[in-house]
Image (tube, rainbow, N blue to C red):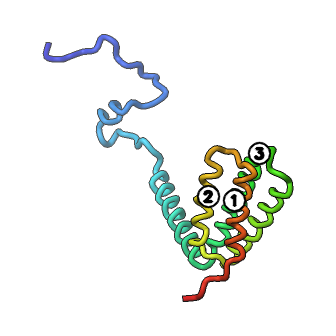
Amino acid sequence: MDEITSSNPPPESLPFRRPADYYATPLGDAKPLFPRWVPFGCGTAAIVLLIIIFVGGIFAAHGGMGELFGFMFGSMQGEIDKMFTKEVTPAQKAGFDNEMKTMRDAVRQNRLPIDQLQPLLRTMRDVTSDEHVTPAEADQLTKEMHAINTAPPPKAK
């Protein structure tokens, strides 16, 4: 009994190679698990991804953040419009949309520093946390955006 034998040897017609079979074959007979192009394809994909991130950083540093934040506020406006309750009047909705459009244009043209938007973003988070925007909350958002839109531009450093 020096040798342990299995009563059920593995079938030879498996649709895949088992790792044990791969490692048990002599080095010269082992067929690679992956095609030769896989390391080159993954390496190329990683390089392309790094280039995209690098170019995105350059774009963001030269004014692209305004476009990005403009897009973000546009999608937030659409989500908030869906959350208005039935009690929110059409005039309140129109006032909200007008102030949001004015603010988005200022952000897109880099006339509005992002740090001025922090209180508004907190209020938006708090107001939309229950996924319902009441008339009082709509007025609060509109007033905060109006204050941001009418504030004097910050002094250049």
Horizontal side of residue 2 vs 23, given as left or right: left
Q: Secondary structure at mark 3?
A: loop
Name the residue rendered at 34%, 31% in the picture: 21
Q: Earlier in the sequence, mark 1 or mark 3?
A: 3
Name the residue rendered at 70%, 45% in the picture: 132
From this viewpoint, which residue is outermost toward the front?
136
On the image, the x and y values in percent for residue 47 come to 49, 64
Callouts 2 and 1 close, C-beta under 8 Å: yes
Task: Name the disc covering residue 85, or none.
Answer: 3
Split into 4 quadrants, where in the image is the C terminus?
Answer: bottom right
Quarter residue 73 falls in: bottom right
Quarter residue 142 falls in: bottom right
Horizontal side of residue 139 vs 54, given as left or right: right
Judging depth in this view, the residue of 89 and 32 nearest the camera is 89
Q: Which residue is mark 1?
A: 140
Task: Name the disc covering residue 123, or none.
Answer: 2
Q: Is residue 37 visible?
A: yes
On the image, the x and y values in percent for residue 4 come to 20, 16
